[in-house]
Amino acid sequence: MYEPKPIDTDDVELSEELLELTEKIAENVHNVWSAGRIADGWTYGDVRNDISKETPCLVPYDELSETEKSYDRNTALETLKVIIKLGYKIEKR
């Protein structure tokens, strides 16, 4: 049985600048996901329907519910934290 073992990033604190970057990455994560869904034939629908490939999440990021945004934010946040945890440095040019 598969047991996920994500890298523990609980001890990583991001700077204010990187926390602001989290939201931009989260929006991009949503856009990449949306583009993939659309390429796979999904369209907007009021409720998710896997058979007809409809989902209410095919909207611009700023129109998502906070619950839906939290999935993208968590992906962005954990990605930034694991980059730092692995010893990389992120700097704005």
Image (cartoon, rainbow, N blue to C red):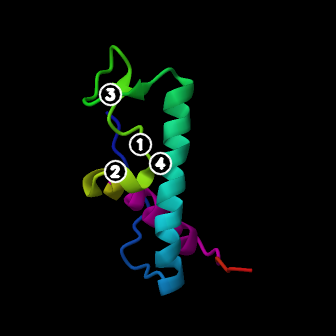
Q: Residue at x 50, y 41 (%)?
A: 33
| Disc 3/disc 4 C-alpha distance (Å) | 17 Å
Q: Which residue is mark 2?
A: 64
Residue 13 x, y percent position in the rendering: 43, 82
Residue that carries the numbered disc 1 in the rendered image = 59
Q: Amino acid at mark 4?
A: His
* Residue lying furthest right: 93
Which residue is denoted by mark 4 in the rendering? 30
Give the residue type at disc 1.
Answer: Val
Mark 2–mark 3 CB contact (< 8 Å): no
Name the residue type under label 2: Leu
Dot placed on the residue nearer the N-terminal end, 3 or 4: 4
Residue 8, image quadrant: bottom left
Spatial separation of the CA atoms under disc 2 and disc 4: 10 Å
Find residue 65 and report its horizontal and vertical position in percent.
28, 52
Q: Would residue 77 be counted in the magenta stretch? A: yes
On the question of residue 15 being in view, the answer is: no
